[in-house]
Amino acid sequence: EETFRRLETHWLPMIARHYQDELPVILAGNKLDMIPTPDEQSLMRSRQQIVTLMQRFKFVRQFVMCSARELRNMDDLFLKAQQAVLYPISPLYDLDSSRITKACRKALTRIFRLYDKDNDGLLSDSEVASFQTQILNTSWTEKDVVGWKKVVARNNPSEEAVVRDSKFTVAGFLAIFDVFITNKNRLDIPWRVLRRFGYSDDLELTIPPSVTEVEEGNWKLTPSARQFLAAMFHQFDKDNDGVLSPDGITAIFSVHQGPALPPWHPYRAKELFRDCDTTVRMTPMIDPASDLHFSTGDPSISASGVTIMSNLTIPSSLGGSATVISAGSHDPINTESMDFLDWIGHWHMISCISPAVVREELFLLGHLEPKITPSFPPNRKESYRKKSVVPDAVNYSKILLPSEEKRVLVVGGQGCGKTSFIKSLCDGGDDTDPLQTSHTSKAEASNTYIKLKRKNRMVEEEFVVHLIFLELPEKQRDGYFAQINDNTSFDLLLFLFDSTDGASFDTLKTIELAYLSEEVPRVYLATKSDLCDLESSGNLASVVKRALEHCEELDIEPPLVTSAADIANKSGDHRTRTVEHIAKCAIEKARARPHAERKRQEAAHIRSLKWWGGMVAAAVIFSIFWGRNRKNETEDRVGWWKAWFSQPKKIQA
């Protein structure tokens, strides 16, 4: 009694003070061999004392009665002590609230997603059996499945449903591990699972090097990554309205050990892209569902001399349809609603900045690329596995529009309105004034998208063009253009100049002459058209006229004349035409590369001459050989006659 009282009043309080209840303790009741056979009342009293002690000091993991003299229960004592160290409870379970810790819930939820093959937010019997077989190396029978559903229903620590449509929910999956921890005292089970998936003792996820390995220049999302992102969007679009709510975005990123925010959010982007040359533009994000604009323009983009997009003075041929929807960045405090193309566009944008960061983010969300999927040892016990067929993931590629991703490098002199122009395109429906900007000190990325139509095998189809604008500040310009001809980091160079300032256009001509070859696609665009009179005495303004003559000389698209104020204040058609113009220049580079049409015609002419020259040469060679063969045949045919007459005749004596 005295040793037990001393334990309760001295030793355990001291351990609690010095180790903040984090040091696991195993109590050993020694000298079991000296205790006479107790009566039932004594056993009840002793058990109640131990229970009271363990409730007061929750870091006490086990109590074992043993005898060192007779070696009774000594193996069990050391085994439990070993398990207390190898499988700590504090990272998994909060003893104060009697719940699985937040970090453990996030880790197990991510593992849940890895085995939710059909991405319906539920684990079917076959998916649970696959998890049991591959990770715990044991098989489940149908009886086991039914039994566990009853167990988690009785021991549900949360208010959420653990089973829905005869499938385990995330809450049900967590309840299984809650039973192992609290009822069965099998901490080794959750730790085996967590460590199998790369979690440390602090539940920090170790990211394999193969995840972030990306081939140079391969910045686009893989098909499997697009499938995963589409599945996440549709799974967490709870009301099926085609718009992902802020709560849905938070739920997707809830498996992150840090804040449940997307990687383009300012809170995370600042740290994620700290070492990158480009970062995400820190501006508010709009709700794209409220900013859909339609246009009836689909100008020709094929022949030289035919413009893609008209401005106030240059006509264009129309005859199709296009739809543009802007996708800005994000609110500096909260996330905002996003439609699917806005959602996938943001992933394209950050993939353009750093493909390695994107692959790491997808891995944290629960996506494994096929080539890095971990291999599991086979299990001989496949009685239930043979009966189960794991459902395939939904193939969203059959219902999603085909898409192209184009990177547009925006270059212009200081004060030409680059930032305002990009804000007006990418934040078209936002309440903020696009003309209120700050100095850009580092290259920033923004994105928008547009729906276009094209003919594919004589059938007209709709497709999406995601435009990723990379705004290049002046201080990075010279170093970037020094290697621009060998650079594959953009698909189109967008030259912006101030229509009221001739020096702005001269700066672009200087850059073009000093750095660019004719293979670099480019397009000119005049800004601040609202501040100048484009027509003076029937002629274009001098700066725009010079730009038009320069483009005609290079045989590229004439400059589009616009302004951020007009895009922001006028109807959506104005913004649609601007985005459509840029998108088509990025897709069809024939009118973006200088003299491309002339070179194409010259190349076609040379190919034609080579073809005809080859045909003539072949005909001549054939004639020579044919003539020679005919001559040989003729000689063989009459040679015997000539030889008979040419022989000398014998004179008879």
Image (cartoon, grey):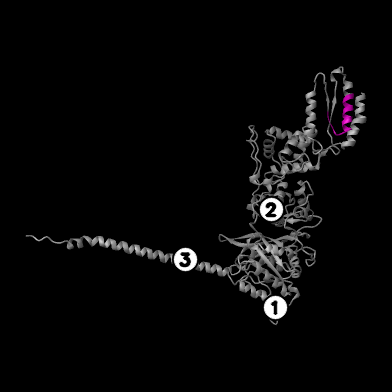
Residue 404: x, y in percent?
A: 64, 58
> Is 461 one of the magenta-colored residues?
no
Does residue 315 appear in the picture of this structure? no
Q: Amino acid at mark 2?
A: Pro
Relative placement, left or right, of 64 versus 641 is right
Cα distance, mark 1 to mark 3? Answer: 46 Å
Q: Which residues are magenta?
A: 45-62
> For the residue carrying disc 1, how many other residues have a C-alpha within 10 Å: few (<14), some (14-19), or many (20+)?
some
| 609 w.r.t. 184: above or below | below
Dominant secondary structure of the residues highlighted in magenta in the image: helix
Q: In this view of the protein, can residue 478 be seen by the observer?
A: yes
Q: Secondary structure at mark 3?
A: helix
Amino acid marked by disc 3: Lys
| Label 2 close to label 1 by CB (< 8 Å) | no
Q: Name the residue tied to disc 3.
A: 610
Label ID, residue 355: 2
Residue that carries the numbered disc 1 in the rendered image: 542
Cα separation, mark 2 vs mark 1, equals: 44 Å
Assess whether mark 3 and mark 1 are in contact (beta carbons under 8 angstroms): no
